[in-house]
Image (cartoon, coloured by chain):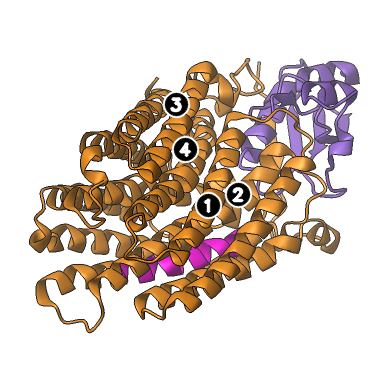
Chain colours: A orange, B purple
């Protein structure tokens, strides 16, 4: 018997009728045909998960030294960079290789560059963490150079990709602002590394560190996470009616302006009043975003709150706590004994509490989706195929989430109280929680 | 001619793997027509930018290809009228946890 011919017809952007344009004014028209190959984003995600476990493992081991009152210690720098670069940025870059083609309807300019970049970046992160962890700050230039090269390739690849985008949804604007921030972050990071050797900059080294770190967390990772949530949350929760532009636009303006102003204020040491003004702008942006996120959930038609949403909601709580800790930092004298502990709690809450939880939550969607599309999509309509959340054990995943959440709370309480046992136990719990998430998700890839 | 109910039953085997709901109960099927061994299906997606659209369109085509006498299946993705959750069937609403 001859197999029937199946013809699929999808409208192109050019053929889109005005009424359809009105129905979805800024939404691109799909699609998986533009998507990068499976192996490109997944390699970043697997490596990022491994670095997450490593970061919390080192944090547990080095926790006793974290309460000494010094922030720029080799161990703390190593853990911070393992978190920001190895875990969060690694996953963010992999997610962008998957997300940008789908959401902005454009193919990645060069997958080969993406793969080359991965190896350079991997070596750079490992080298930087090693050099920093062993206290050899004079030799961080070589891994820093590798990282600059890898991120430079990433930015080139993304810019060449984005120049072909025809229509820009709200998420696209966040992505563009995040990439601009990343360019500045890497420039500031390189300047920092070179300045350690050559001492050529007339700026305080601490000012550079603070400006660099804030732009990385808020400008690069933060704007990306917020922008992605504006696409994924309404899509997965079936939020309706929801207009992403109504509060999304002022949120975007407040967060980008606030991040830029904070970078300049910290770099140029403009003082407490400038920092307070930046805080108000950013807090307004955070407030609007939290309100808009609550709206997405309130109008959702899919009632159960799934694991990704649970991570995201916990991440939002982390963002609010980090914002409040930021205010406490501005209002506390740098000479006060509590100041370094506030700095550390603030960093943990922003990086792991907000960005880390959110990133892990999104991976519970992205990784099963990638694997499902590759393995099961061709069988759909011909035989029974599993759902996305059938691909991993949900109870174990929930246990990992709870472990990470409780661990973070214990660690932050330990930091603020200056108590080592809850700090160390908290980080150990975080390591166990992320190890469960990593095992779960890596098993989805290789099962 | 194939019974329309039989075609819809076949289409109910195609699930949105994220929502766990089939394309019929999700209200994605806008039109179903057949003539001279050709089945024409107009369908939509819950959102433009849905990364699963190609898999679902192909799955829909494959699901109705099983019937004897079918020579050709045409699956068209359309955006008008725009999908809203109001198109979800009663069964679908229950599956998504909507209050009764």
Residue denoted by label 4: A360
Residue denoted by label 2: A229
The answer as to whether the residues below labels 1 and 2 share one chain is: yes
Mark closest to the chain's N terminus, 4 or 2: 2
Relative to the observer, which residue lies in front, B75 or A390? A390
Badge 3 crowding class, 10 Å Cα cut-off, few under 14, some 14 to 19, many 20 or more, is many
Asked if the stretch drawn in magenta spans residue A336, the answer is no
The mark found on residue A225 in the picture is: 1
Q: Residue B98 sits in which quadrant? A: top right
Asked if the stretch drawn in magenta spans residue A172, the answer is yes
The answer as to whether the residues below labels 1 and 4 share one chain is: yes
Q: Chain of mark 1?
A: A
Magenta-drawn segment: A171-188
Q: Above or below — where is B17 with respect to A409? A: above
Q: Label 3 near label 4: C-beta < 8 Å?
A: no
Mark closest to the chain's N terminus, 1 or 3: 1
The answer as to whether the residues below labels 4 and 2 share one chain is: yes
The mark found on residue A403 in the picture is: 3
Mark closest to the chain's N terminus, 2 or 3: 2
Gap in Å between the C-alphas at discs 1 and 4? 11 Å
Q: Quadrant of the N terminus of chain A?
A: top right
Q: Residue furthest bottom?
A: A202
Nearer the viewer's eye, disc 2 or disc 3?
3
Q: Secondary structure at mark 3?
A: helix
The mark found on residue A199 in the picture is: none
Q: Above or below — where is A208 with respect to A413? A: below
């Amino acid at each position: 018997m001859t197999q029937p011919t199946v013809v699929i017809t999808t409208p192109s952007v050019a053929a889109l009728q005005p009424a359809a344009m009105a129905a979805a004014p800024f939404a691109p028209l799909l699609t998986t045909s533009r998507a990068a190959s499976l192996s490109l984003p997944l390699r970043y995600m697997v490596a990022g998960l491994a670095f997450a476990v490593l970061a919390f493992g080192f944090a547990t081991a080095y926790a006793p030294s974290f309460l000494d009152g010094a922030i720029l210690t080799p161990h703390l720098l190593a853990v911070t960079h393992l978190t920001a670069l190895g875990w969060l940025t690694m996953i963010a870059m992999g997610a962008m290789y998957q997300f940008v083609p789908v959401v902005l309807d454009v193919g990645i300019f060069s997958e080969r560059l993406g793969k080359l970049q991965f190896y350079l970046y991997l070596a750079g992160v490992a080298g930087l963490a090693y050099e920093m962890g062993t206290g050899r700050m004079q030799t961080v230039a070589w891994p820093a150079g590798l990282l600059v090269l890898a991120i430079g390739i990433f930015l080139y690849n993304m810019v060449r990709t984005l120049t072909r985008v025809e229509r820009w949804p709200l998420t696209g604007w966040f992505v563009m602002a995040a990439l601009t921030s990343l360019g500045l972050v890497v420039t500031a990071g390189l300047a920092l590394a070179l300045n350690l050797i050559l001492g050529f900059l007339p700026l305080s080294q601490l000012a550079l560190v603070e400006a660099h770190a804030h732009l990385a967390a808020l400008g690069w990772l933060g704007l990306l996470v917020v922008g992605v949530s504006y696409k994924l949350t309404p899509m997965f929760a079936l939020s309706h009616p929801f207009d992403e532009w109504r509060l999304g636009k002022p949120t975007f303006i407040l967060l980008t302006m606030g991040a830029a102003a904070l970078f300049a204020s910290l770099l140029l040491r403009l003082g407490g009043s400038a920092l307070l003004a930046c805080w108000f702008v950013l807090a307004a942006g955070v407030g609007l975003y939290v309100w808009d996120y609550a709206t997405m959930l309130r109008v959702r038609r899919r009632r159960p709150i799934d694991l990704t949403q649970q991570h995201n909601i916990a991440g939002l709580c982390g963002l609010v706590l980090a914002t409040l800790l930021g205010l406490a930092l501005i209002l506390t004298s740098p000479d006060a004994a509590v100041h370094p502990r506030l700095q550390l709690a603030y960093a943990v809450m922003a990086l792991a509490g907000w960005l880390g939880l959110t990133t892990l939550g999104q991976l519970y969607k992205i990784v099963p989706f990638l694997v499902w599309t590759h393995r099961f999509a061709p069988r759909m309509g011909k035989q029974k195929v599993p759902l996305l959340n059938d691909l991993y054990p949900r109870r174990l995943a929930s246990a990992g989430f709870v472990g990470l959440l409780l661990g973070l709370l214990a660690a932050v309480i330990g930091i603020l109280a200056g108590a080592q046992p809850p700090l160390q136990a908290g980080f150990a719990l975080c390591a166990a929680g992320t190890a469960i998430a990593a095992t779960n998700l890596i098993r989805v890839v290789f099962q | 001619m194939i019974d329309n109910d039989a075609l819809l039953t076949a289409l109910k085997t195609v699930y949105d793997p994220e929502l766990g709901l089939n394309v019929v109960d999700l209200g994605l099927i806008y039109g179903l027509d057949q003539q001279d061994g050709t089945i024409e299906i107009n369908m939509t997606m819950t959102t433009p930018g849905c990364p699963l659209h190609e898999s679902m369109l192909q799955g829909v085509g494959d699901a109705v290809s099983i019937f004897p006498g079918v020579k050709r299946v045409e699956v068209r993705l359309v955006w008008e009228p725009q999908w809203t959750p109001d198109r979800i069937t009663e069964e679908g609403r229950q599956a998504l946890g909507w209050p009764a």
